[in-house]
Image (cartoon, helix red, strand yellow):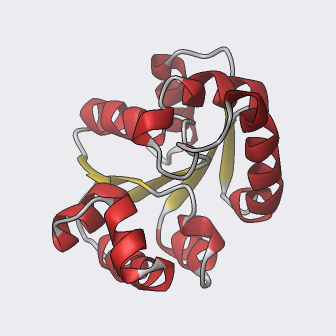
Amino acid sequence: MVIALLGYMGSGKSHIARLLSQKLNFEFIDLDKQIMLKNKRSVAEIFQMSGEIYFRKQERELLEEYLASKNDVVLSLGGGTPAYYNNMEVINLNSFSFFLRSSVNTLSQRLLKQKNTRPLIAKINDEDLPEFIAKHLFERNAFYSKAQFTVDIDGKTPEEIAEEIMHHLPF
């Protein structure tokens, strides 16, 4: 069984996926980290040196590999993964997909503290960050909303979010 967590950067996908994998005794896989390991470069370096199209192809190959896995896996997707190719269709056909939905305000508060480690927002002024996130969310929500389940995460602990996800699983 594959459980796929998707959502915007800062929504807690990796943290919740790790917690969920421990609770269920499933393997934890962070798609972005696997791409970095395969390429021996950071996501920012891959984008800079090889371009986004190369990155998205790598992402799709690994996504297909993990979705075809016979192992029990909790897969943390990259924030942009659902928005490319027919990734959402493939994700929904081969996993239980969960959109970790968060408000612009919550995401802004979290990401302000992480700007230096997030190449996409590193050069954006603090005052402009909420507007940038809102615009990006608007563009990506059409894909995120195709997930089989949506979990609102604002005001919830990671434990509560993991429990809510587990409630939707068929066991």
Q: Give the side of residue 57 with respect to residue 135, left or right.
A: left
Q: Which x, y percent locates residue 143? A: 72, 65
Q: Give the side of residue 147 with respect to residue 49, left or right.
A: right
Q: State which quadrant residue 125 falls in.
A: top right
Viewer-nearest residue: 127 or 100: 127
Q: Is residue 154 above or below residue 63?
A: above
Viewer-nearest residue: 120 or 143: 120
Q: In this view, does 81 lie above or below 111?
A: below
Residue at the spot 22% in from the left edge and 64% down from the top edge: 41
Q: Which x, y percent locates residue 91? A: 53, 70
Residue at the spot 57% in from the left edge and 41% down from the top edge: 168
Q: Give the side of residue 116 with respect to residue 131, left or right.
A: left
Q: Can residue 96 be seen in this view?
A: yes
Q: Is residue 67 visible?
A: no
Number of numbered callouts drawn? 0
Q: Quadrant of the N terminus?
A: bottom left
Q: Give the side of residue 165 with respect to residue 8, left or right.
A: left
Q: Quadrant of the C terminus?
A: top left
Q: Which x, y percent locates residue 85? A: 60, 84
Viewer-nearest residue: 5 or 168: 5
Residue at the spot 61% in from the left edge and 16% down from the top edge: 156
Q: State which quadrant residue 9 falls in.
A: top right
Q: Which x, y percent locates residue 87? A: 57, 77
Viewer-nearest residue: 113 or 81: 113
